[in-house]
Amino acid sequence: MRLTLLQFFLTIVVLIWLDIYAYQATKTLLGKVRPVTSKVIRYAYVVQAIIMLGLVFFLWLVQAGTTYFMFLISFVFMSYAAKLLAVLFVFFDDIRRVLRWFFEGRKRRYEKRVASGQKMPRSKFLARSAVVAATLPVVTMSFGIVKGAYDYRIRRRKVYLPNLPKAFEGVKIGQLSDIHSGSFFDKTAVQGGIDMLLHEKPDLIFFTGDLVNNETKEVKEYIDMFSKVKADLGVYSTLGNHDYGDYRSWPSQAAKRQNLEDMIKVHERMGWKLMMNENQSLRIGGDQVSIIGVENWGAGRFAKYGDLDKAARNAEGDVKLLLSHDPSHWDAQVRTQHPDIDLMFAGHTHGMQLGVEIGDWRWSPSKYMYKQWADLYKEDHQHLYVNRGYGFLGFPGRIGILPEITIIELTGQPV
């Protein structure tokens, strides 16, 4: 959502202050540099600051979600994140100097520094530290773009469902979520991830929403590729919050409706069974389970197109599997109103594309917004799996929380 004029003005004021403050570290480091060199560097700093502010204004005007938008906003973010870290060091140094000025006289400060044999004033040390710290977001985010964006990982989990029909013992379900095809910039890498999924030979495949960022036409170049996603028991899908066209301006409501109709047709062309608040029985021999697909339903400000009661009505089978894009749906409605749903598949969070995972321990800022944000959860007899996402949005990369292909094996035997 675009910032209001007032919000944009306040943002610009903060960014200008940040540039001015970060400039102090630059000036400190230029203390013994030749005057001509110092002047060139200072002018270069001013020029880049003006360019960055110009880019901020440009990004405020254009449509979010496109590939070039994500690269530009990442570039701007890296610049200001670097400056912010530098500012923290300079700000600390300013506080230190104010406190010393308050508690010590100028002469005593000088004598104390000479007596201690200190050769480099602490202000310059902190300025150098600020420059070193400022490189961290640039290096980290650049690595996330170059390496993390398409570093697909297969996540395997076995889920115990005591009422699972015998014919479904060992059935493998592949899950993709949050493809965000409008973000991709390496088609070969995307194909590599699809090949990884198909190499697993899942019996059944689920896609849990967000095929695009803003509009259906973003997936046009990838329809043939995703059409190859096949499984013996079928491919089932549902819509995510980005698939409805809610995040862009349309010339008319009719154009927006047409975009949604086009999205439905794309799923048909790819051979994916799109579940729009409905259910379908899946049979192997005389045994059956029920697949339930609900339109997007998210807690808080997210759209609530989903109708779970309608979707689950007359669902048959000893086991019920639900496709619902947003994991907040699980606590809000699934667990409280439909305790007969055994396993829900979701995505949406991306794990914020940022975090740390070591073995079974994981952390991401996403955990402060979503109680369930990645991997497998269980409450009583019900399960939820949250896929970390296949694509990316906003930042064209991933740091720590890598793109995911999920393989869930169903079993009626305790694990």
Image (cartoon, rainbow, N blue to C red):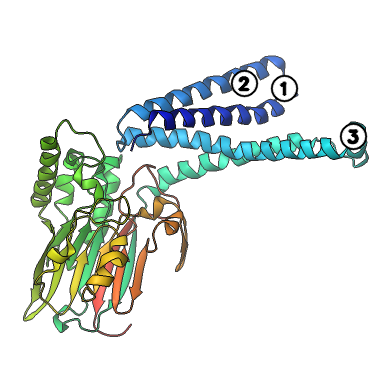
Amino acid at the residue labelled 2: Ile
Q: Residue at x 39, y 63 (%)?
A: 371
Q: In what element is the residue under mark 3?
A: loop
Q: Residue at x 11, y 72 (%)?
A: 315
Disc 3 to disc 1, C-alpha distance? 30 Å
Furthest toward the front, the residue is: 6
Can residue 206 be seen?
yes
Q: Which residue is mark 1?
A: 33
Furthest toward the top, the residue is: 36
Q: Label 3 crowding class (10 Å Cα cut-off): few <14, some 14-19, many 20+? A: few
Q: Quadrant of the N terminus?
A: top left
Amino acid at the residue labelled 3: Gly
Furthest toward the left, the residue is: 286
Asked where in the image residue 380 lies, by quadrant, the reply is bottom left
**Image mark for residue 105:** 3
Amino acid at the residue labelled 1: Val
Q: Earlier in the sequence, mark 3 or mark 2?
A: 2
Q: Front-most of 163 and 30?
A: 163
Disc 1 to disc 2, C-alpha distance? 10 Å
Disc 3 to disc 2, C-alpha distance? 34 Å
- Are dots 1 and 2 in contact, CB under 8 Å? yes
Q: Which residue is mark 2?
A: 41
Q: Residue at x 38, y 34 (%)?
A: 3
Q: Is residue 105 left or right of residue 90?
A: right
Q: Is residue 314 left or right of residue 394?
A: left
Q: Is residue 256 left or right of residue 146?
A: left
- Are dots 3 and 1 in contact, CB under 8 Å? no
Asked where in the image residue 28 lies, by quadrant, the reply is top right
Q: Position of residue 357 (x, y in %)?
A: 46, 61
Q: In what element is the residue under mark 2?
A: helix
Can residue 201 be seen?
no
Q: Front-most of 83 and 246?
A: 246
